[in-house]
Every structure is written in C-alpha cells, then in structure tokens.
Amino acid sequence: GAHNLKTPSVISAGLLLWLCSAALAAPPSPAPPSPAPPVAASTPTAAPVPTLALPAPLRLQYAIRGRVGFLPYRAGGELLWTHDGRAYQARMEVNLFLLGSRVQHSQGQLTPAGLQPQRFVDRVNKDRSVDFDYAAGRIRFSEGTEPVPLPEGAQDHLSIFMQLGGLIGAAPQRYPAGTALTFPAMGIYGPESWRFVVAGEEKIDLPGGEQATVKLTRAA
C-alpha cells in the first residue's frame, strides 16, 4: 500500500546531491550579518557559516530508482523551489506506479542563519502536518504527538536538505570529507535527530551534462 512511501531514502539522497551541486554553482543569496547557523559538527570541525548559497527559484524533475525490501521500483518526482529572499516554499512530489503519490511541502522564512520552517505538510492519502510556533517556542504535530519545545536550528524533513545544500554551497571548503552535521529534524510523528557525513566530491551525469556535487550520507 501507500505506506511504503514513508521512507524515501533514495529520494532524499538524490535531492541532497542536487541541492549541493546547484548551490555550488549559484551565487549566495544576500543575507544580513548574523550569528553562525546552529549546526553541530564532529571532527573535523565545520566552522560556522553565517550565510547560505541558495539556488534561484526553479522546478526540477527526477527519475527515481529504489528498493522496498526485495522489490525494486522506479518513480517520477518533481521538486518546486521558490523564494523571494525573505520567505520560501518547497514542494516535493513523488509518484509511484500503482502505489500513488507522496507530497511534502515546507514553507517558512529565510533568516541570516538559514531556513526557518513554519509549516510542514506530508501527504500520503491525507495531509499530516507539523507547525513551528516561534512565539510560543513549541512545535505541534497533527498526528497526536504532544507538542515539544522548539529547538534552535530545527528543520523539517524537506527544508533540511535545502539548509544542507545552502550551507555547503556557501563555503564548501569548510566541509571536508568526514565532517558530520547534525540537525533537529521534525517529522509528522515527532522530533528526530538527523546526522549527515560529508563523503567528498563526486561527479554525476545529468541530462544537462556532468555536474560536480558534494556527496553526503545520512548516518544511522
């Protein structure tokens, strides 16, 4: 059933690879001076980066391959990314043959420290949401999970990839292979901690030609 769409690791990996490469090629979005973004790093240490290099608004289409258990699958995906330098919206849709679609949508503000999500919606058959209440310092979940304190630097399951790509794109030399970055990641069922490790540079072939990227893996 459609519940198989709950763990789109292949989608996440592909999205992250593109964001890093696109950010590396794009000029940084203007941002006022600010404290460093709240990113936890392990050895080697990643120095604070106060600005992000975010791609201009665009639409990307994906050809996705993956595996659910022993069953391989192919899917189509589309990422829509828009911002005006102050607010952003991101929408990722994946369509699996016979299994239906999954849509994730994140919207919020762009701050000197990066993306500040306000609402995240994850739709498989119905909308499930996460609301970030900065005034009250709480995060609320539609699926019955009790509200939790809003941690500094919190991202949702979609905005986190834009934040990663923007940070590395702004100063890739600050993130050598082996650097680890940890974020509070808010999903529809509650808070999680996601940790990524920089594997190094990698070139991938795309329809538009070969593209230099920075490869990251999500650590267990």
Image (cartoon, rainbow, N blue to C red):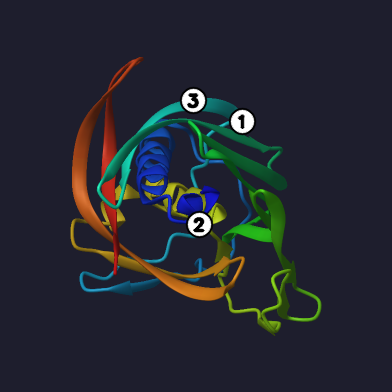
Q: Nearer the viewer, mark 1 or mark 2?
A: 2
Circle 2 Cα neighbour tier, 10 Å, few/some/many (<14 / 14–19 / ≥20):
many
Residue 162: x and y in percent read 50, 48
Circle 1 Cα neighbour tier, 10 Å, few/some/many (<14 / 14–19 / ≥20):
few
Q: Nearer the viewer, residue 149 or 180?
A: 149
Disc 3 marks which amino acid? Gln
Residue 174: x and y in percent read 30, 57
Tell me the residue that label 3 is attached to.
Answer: 61
Residue placed at 50% from the left, 34% from the top? 98
Q: Secondary structure at mark 3?
A: strand
Tell me the residue that label 1 is attached to.
Answer: 57
73, above or below 7, in the image: above
Circle 3 Cα neighbour tier, 10 Å, few/some/many (<14 / 14–19 / ≥20):
few
Residue placed at 66% from the left, 59% from the top? 117
Disc 2 marks which amino acid? Ile
Tell me the residue that label 2 is attached to.
Answer: 160
Tags 1 and 2 touching, CB below 8 Å: no
In the rendered structure, find residue 189 and report the number of the disc placed on it: none
Q: Secondary structure at mark 2?
A: helix
What's the distance in space between the residues labelled 2 and 3, CA to CA?
19 Å
Q: Nearer the viewer, mark 1 or mark 3?
A: 3
Residue 92: x and y in percent read 57, 40
Apparent side of residue 60 relative to residue 199 in the rendered image (left or right) = right
What's the distance in space between the residues labelled 1 and 3, CA to CA?
14 Å
Of the numbered discs 2 and 3, the one sitting upstream in the chain is: 3
Residue placed at 69% from the left, 71% from the top? 143
Q: Nearer the viewer, residue 130 or 149?
A: 130
Q: Secondary structure at mark 1?
A: loop
79, above or below 61, in the image: below
- The answer to whether residue 119 is seen in the rendering is no
Residue placed at 68% from the left, 45% from the top? 88
